[in-house]
Image (tube, coloured by chain):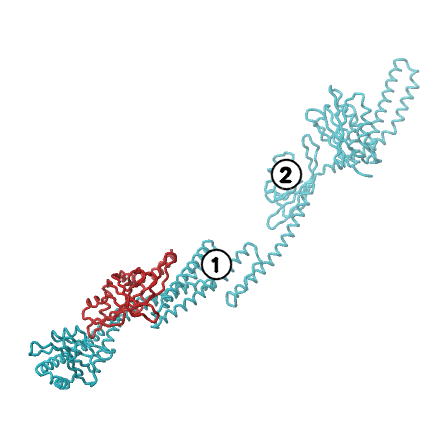
Chain colours: A cyan, B red
């Protein structure tokens, strides 16, 4: 746009110079070129107005759209335009006023009066000369009228010479020359206008004639009145040039007067032309200054706009924005400094971003670890508000949401009374007021209804974070550890019991049988019967003790299994075949059951124990039913054994795999403990649930593994 | 609003002089051409085509400003343009001849006479302006040469020749005082004998 404005400005100036030349050059002014020039100037100015209008429109649009730098450009344009417009307008008004007054001063009344006076003087002089010739003519005519025709010519010549007349010619009414007398001997007088002769015949008639614009002649016609009434009327024509000095002066005054009058008449037009030219100059100057103000304003505001834009970009995080160099002035230095600052900022931001990423990775790493920890971790602030927790902690506290952040711990604990002791421990630790608190831990047993007892270890550690203190609460479910410890303890007891009890049982049984054998026949019938009954009781109880001790031994034996390939479905079929008499067992299995690697005998014992338990539970049930499902779960096999028996009481279901926990009136309470142990030895999983209405469901998952 | 005011000011500065100039403008004067007479002259020119003479009358409705200008000594020149166009029923008319003549009136202040120079350069002097105007109303002896074997349209136009006015009056395009012109007078001619 700036190139367009520059080119247009140059064209305008060129046109204006041509117009000014045209006004000063009288040859050009009358030609059509002046009209063309004027038209071109007006057209140019109109195009300049359109151009500026377009520029203004664009600028206002930019301001409306809040484009960076547009407001500054607008302000600069207004300022620069005013700086140009005001002085030019003043000069214009002064010039117009000066011009108008100057033109008016040309037509001063005194000049006009002087010119009119000069002209009148000339006219009067001519009138006087005319009067003089009139008198002379009348005198000559009177003298001639009284002489004979033969003497007329000589008299005419005498009188002409006497009165110093240049030419004297006598005509009749038909324009026929009668007599001629002239200073020039060879004069052939021109025939006068018939009208002039007619007027001259009626009386004196004088006229002024001009020749070649240089000479003025006075020509008079005077009738010659003769006494002879019948004779023709003769007319005397006298021609007398005005003295050249007077004639030249008079003609000069006439010429100047004419030019002055023309000028006077043209003064309005002159004013209009000059005012028009001045107006064109004004408009050109104004529009050029406004156009220039756009270019200059943009040049000034452009680097600042770039700076503002770059600042905005940087505030949005784009540090790549580099502004091109803008010379060596203050703005150039500013831009250079800005670029340097941007570069430093980018480096700092990149470093910060890298740190943040590292921190994020560390945080994610920590979160991943926390999320996958089975240990619950909670970070509390001094007000016992949870600031961080992992999923395990949420599970422990039965929270619906995995994120318990910003929740007061008391609120969570209040829902479950069993957590109260733990909260009391935490509360007392935090509120203790000790300065250098050390790590503390405490073990809590949580007895949940219908569930196995849980043992948790709570460890609280203070961490100092700025001024505030926070506490890390590590909650570890050590139920399995304690259960394993208990099992080990039970195993040890069982082993010792088996060892200590089993040895004396055989001598006791043999001694009892020997007593019975030796004294049975020696006693009377009644005593013999008592002895037999007593020894039988001893033998039976010893046998029962043996069975119990064997079971103890089985429970307490060291984990020793002999794994081999086992087709579990066939194994189940074999065991079920033993119970086919009652036909209450139904087996449902998937089409393809893979071979597992396990100890077949131990698994048989598991199935038998479970079926025995089910049969015991079904003793008082009419519609007895046992369902066995064998499912192929891909990497493991799932066995489900369901019965519709009386089920396991709620009170013991949580501890059903512990020794001596049984709902049966008879039995050692070691069956399910042994089952649990065997499945554990196979690295499997066993769970027992109550079926809604009645019955029990045992689910065993065994992994399919190769040798 | 500020910009609107500025623009309005500029427009006012531009237009005001033009408006004021037009205030001084007067309605155009009119010239009415009538009584066209064409007569053939006996002589045959070097192109072996006959000469013709055109006479016509005209009514000149002088504006008082023009009369005033004449009395101030400004010479007023009239231009007579004669165009001869061939007429044809099929083809558009074609101008085959264009002749221009001038006549003028000028006041001579020293001698107090109105000097008229007619289209043939002949000078006439009158003491009275009305007599001068009377003379101006008769244009006689406009000689032209044209072949006489076709039908013609003669287009006659008389106008005040602004190019002969003083320079400042010529370039004052806003002054319509000097726009004195006749309408194009069409005179149809058959074959000239």
**Dot 2 lies on which element?**
helix
In front of the other: A569 or B106: B106
Do dots 2 and 1 share one subunit? yes
* Residue linked to disc 2: A423
Q: CA distance from mark 2 to mark 1?
A: 64 Å
| The image quarter in which residue A668 lies | top right
* Rendered location of residue A147, percent (x, y): 8, 83
Q: Which of the image's four quarters has the C terminus of chain A?
A: top right
Please give the name of the residue rendered at 24% of the width and 79% of the height, measured from the top-left corner.
A214
> Is residue A154 positioned above or below A570 on the image?
below
Pick whichever of labels 2 and 1 is earlier in the sequence.
1
* Residue linked to disc 1: A69
* Rendered location of residue B161, percent (x, y): 30, 67
Query: Badge 1 local density, few (<14 within 10 Å), some, or many (20+)?
Result: many
Q: Mark 2 — on which chain does it sit? A: A
* Rendered location of residue B27, percent (x, y): 27, 60
In front of the other: A368 or B20: B20
Query: Nearer the observer, disc 2 or disc 1?
Result: 1
Q: Mark 1 — on which chain does it sit? A: A
């Amino acid at each position: 746009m700036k190139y367009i404005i520059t080119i247009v400005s140059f064209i305008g100036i060129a046109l204006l110079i041509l117009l000014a030349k045209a006004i000063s050059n009288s040859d050009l002014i009358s030609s059509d070129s002046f009209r063309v020039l004027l038209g071109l100037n007006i057209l140019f100015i109109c195009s300049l107005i359109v151009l500026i209008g377009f520029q203004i429109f664009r600028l206002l649009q930019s301001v409306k759209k809040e484009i960076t730098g547009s407001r500054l450009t607008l302000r600069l344009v207004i300022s620069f335009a005013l700086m140009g417009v005001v002085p030019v307008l003043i000069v214009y008004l002064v010039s117009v006023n000066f011009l108008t007054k100057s033109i008016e001063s040309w037509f001063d009344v005194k000049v006009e009066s002087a010119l009119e006076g000069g002209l009148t003087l000339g006219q009067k002089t001519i009138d006087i000369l005319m009067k003089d010739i009139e008198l002379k003519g009348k005198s000559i005519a009177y003298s001639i009228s009284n002489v004979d025709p033969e003497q007329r010519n000589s008299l005419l010549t005498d009188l002409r010479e006497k009165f110093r007349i240049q030419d004297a010619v006598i005509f009749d009414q038909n324009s026929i020359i009668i007599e001629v007398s002239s200073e020039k001997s060879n004069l052939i007088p021109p025939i006068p206008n018939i009208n002039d002769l007619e007027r001259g015949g009626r009386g004196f008639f004088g006229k002024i004639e001009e020749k070649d614009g240089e000479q003025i002649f006075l020509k008079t016609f005077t009738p010659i009145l003769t006494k002879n009434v019948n004779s023709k009327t003769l007319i005397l024509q006298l021609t007398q040039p005005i003295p050249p000095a007077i004639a030249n002066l008079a003609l000069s005054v006439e010429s100047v007067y004419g030019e002055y009058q023309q000028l006077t008449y043209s003064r309005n037009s002159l004013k209009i032309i000059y005012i028009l030219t001045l107006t064109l100059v004004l408009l050109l100057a104004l529009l050029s200054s406004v156009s220039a103000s756009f270019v200059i304003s943009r040049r000034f505001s452009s680097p600042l706009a770039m700076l503002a834009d770059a600042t905005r970009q940087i505030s949005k995080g784009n540090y790549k924005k580099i502004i091109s160099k803008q010379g060596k002035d203050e703005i150039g230095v500013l831009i250079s400094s800005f670029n340097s600052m941007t570069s430093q900022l980018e480096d700092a931001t990149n470093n910060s971003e890298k740190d943040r990423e590292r921190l994020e990775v560390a945080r994610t790493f920590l979160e991943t670890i926390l999320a996958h920890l089975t240990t619950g971790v909670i970070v509390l602030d001094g007000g016992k508000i949870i600031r961080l927790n992992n999923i395990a902690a949420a599970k422990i506290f039965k929270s619906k949401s995995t994120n318990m952040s910003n929740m007061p711990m008391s609120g969570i604990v209040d829902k479950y009374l069993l957590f109260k002791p733990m909260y009391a421990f935490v509360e007392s630790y935090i509120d203790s007021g000790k300065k250098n608190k050390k790590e503390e831990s405490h073990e809590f047993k949580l007895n949940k209804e219908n569930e196995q007892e849980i043992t948790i270890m709570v460890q609280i550690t203070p961490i100092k974070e700025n001024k505030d203190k926070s506490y890390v609460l590590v909650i570890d479910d050590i139920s399995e550890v304690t259960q394993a410890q208990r099992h080990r303890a039970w195993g040890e007891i069982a082993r010792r019991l088996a060892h200590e009890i089993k040895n004396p049982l055989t001598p006791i049984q043999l001694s009892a049988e020997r007593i019975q054998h030796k004294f049975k026949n020696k006693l009377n019938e009644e005593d013999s019967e008592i002895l037999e009954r007593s020894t039988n009781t001893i033998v039976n109880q010893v046998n029962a003790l043996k069975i119990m001790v064997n079971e103890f031994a089985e429970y307490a034996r060291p984990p020793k299994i002999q794994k081999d390939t086992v087709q579990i479905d066939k194994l189940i079929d074999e065991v079920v075949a033993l119970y086919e008499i009652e036909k209450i067992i139904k087996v449902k299995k998937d089409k393809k059951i893979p071979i597992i690697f396990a100890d077949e005998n131990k698994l048989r014992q598991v199935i038998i124990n479970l079926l025995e338990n089910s049969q015991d539970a079904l003793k008082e049930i009419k519609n007895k039913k046992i369902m066995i499902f064998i499912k192929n779960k891909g990497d493991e096999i799932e066995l489900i054994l369901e019965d519709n028996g009386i089920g396991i009481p709620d009170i013991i279901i949580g501890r059903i795999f512990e020794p001596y926990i049984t709902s049966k009136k008879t039995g050692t309470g070691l069956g399910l403990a042994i089952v649990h142990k065997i499945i554990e030895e196979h690295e499997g999983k066993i769970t027992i649930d109550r079926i809604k209405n009645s019955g029990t469901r045992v689910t065993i998952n065994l992994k399919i593994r190769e040798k | 609003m500020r910009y609107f005011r500025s623009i309005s000011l500029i427009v006012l500065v531009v237009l005001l002089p033009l408006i004021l100039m037009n205030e001084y403008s007067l309605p155009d004067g009119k010239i009415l051409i009538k009584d066209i007479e064409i007569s053939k002259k006996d002589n045959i020119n070097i192109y072996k085509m006959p000469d013709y003479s055109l006479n016509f009358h005209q009514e000149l409705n002088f504006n008082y400003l023009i009369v005033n200008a004449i009395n101030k000594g400004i010479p007023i020149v009239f231009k007579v343009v004669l165009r001869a166009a061939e007429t044809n029923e099929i083809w558009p008319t074609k101008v085959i001849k264009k002749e221009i003549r001038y006549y003028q009136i000028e006041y001579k202040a020293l001698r107090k006479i109105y000097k008229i120079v007619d289209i043939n350069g002949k000078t006439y002097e009158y003491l009275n302006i009305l007599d001068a105007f009377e003379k101006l109303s008769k244009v006689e002896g406009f000689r032209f040469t044209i072949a006489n074997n076709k039908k013609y349209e003669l287009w006659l136009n008389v106008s005040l020749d602004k190019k002969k006015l003083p320079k400042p009056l010529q370039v004052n395009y806003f002054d319509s005082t000097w726009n004195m012109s006749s309408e194009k007078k069409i005179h149809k001619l058959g074959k000239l004998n």
